[in-house]
Amino acid sequence: MKKIIPLIALACLSISAHRPSAKGFVSIFDGKSFDGWKVGKNAASFKIEDGAIAVNGEVGHLYYDGPVMSHLFTNVEIKLDIMTTPGSNSGVYFHTSYQDEGWPQKGYEVQVNNSHTDWRRTGSLWAIQDVKETPVKDNEWFTMHIKVKGKLVTILLNDKIVVEYTEPENVQRPKGMEQRLIDKGTFALQAHDPKSKVYFKNIKVKAW
């Protein structure tokens, strides 16, 4: 005998299936505009091409400045798809804050570099815990997933863990890196130099 499910129950099941999880990822880039993002010097280094942020030009940084968590994250995950071109260098900063120009002083940088002359490869927690080899390649899309929980930073490339780093208590950084610390802040994408071209898309975050 067929089990009959009342129409009202079916409706409830359908609504539940499409309701976003309270702790699910939220998109912070619409693929069409820089709404919710802010850049200072060398803004021309950032363009939108085919639904992705194309980064190519003089040194600059594009900061998330939108409404999610008022762009101030502590415990957080960010996932994004990236494609590098040969010889390119870029980075994804977290726990940082907006600067008009220069390299961000606050927060950590996760390296994006598969074949640049800098030996620190994609997935490195730059100058803190570096990797010399990476499982991803130029001219291919890959997914970077950065998790920050308490003092623990986990970096994954295509779901493979490449870095697990726990910041020591009362750590002292060398001169010029004093603010490279777990704290709170936003994200930034890096334009490194005119010879580098890197693409970012499907940028989403989860915070708690």
Image (cartoon, rainbow, N blue to C red):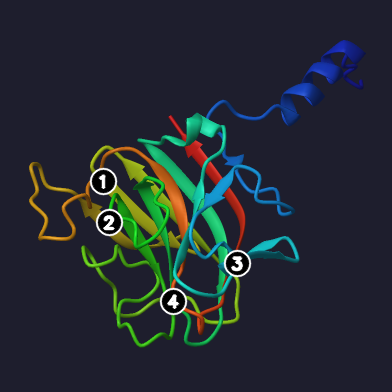
**Which quarter of the rendered picture does the N terminus lie within?**
top right
Mark 4, residue position: 89
Give the residue drawn at x 56%, y 25%: 22
Look at label 4 and name its amino acid: Asn
Look at label 1 and name its amino acid: Leu
Mark 2, residue position: 164
The nearer-to-camera label among 4 and 1 is 4
Are dots 4 and 3 in contact, CB under 8 Å? no
Q: Please state the horizontal and vertical placement of residue 207, each as a whole percent of the image.
A: 46, 34
Look at label 3 and name its amino acid: Ala
Circle 1 residues within 10 Å: few <14, some 14–19, many ≥20? some
The nearer-to-camera label among 2 and 4 is 4
Mark 3, residue position: 44
Up-down: is 159 above or below 84? above
Are dots 4 and 1 in contact, CB under 8 Å? no
Q: Please state the horizontal and vertical placement of residue 84, each as a whole percent of the image.
A: 54, 77
- Measured Cα–Cα span from mark 3 to mark 2: 35 Å
**Which quarter of the rendered picture does the C terminus lie within?**
top left
Of the numbered discs 3 and 2, the one sitting upstream in the chain is 3
Mark 1, residue position: 152
Of the numbered discs 4 and 1, the one sitting upstream in the chain is 4
- Measured Cα–Cα span from mark 2 to mark 1: 7 Å
Task: Identify the image quadrant of residue 124.
Answer: bottom left
Residue 199 showing in the rendered view:
no
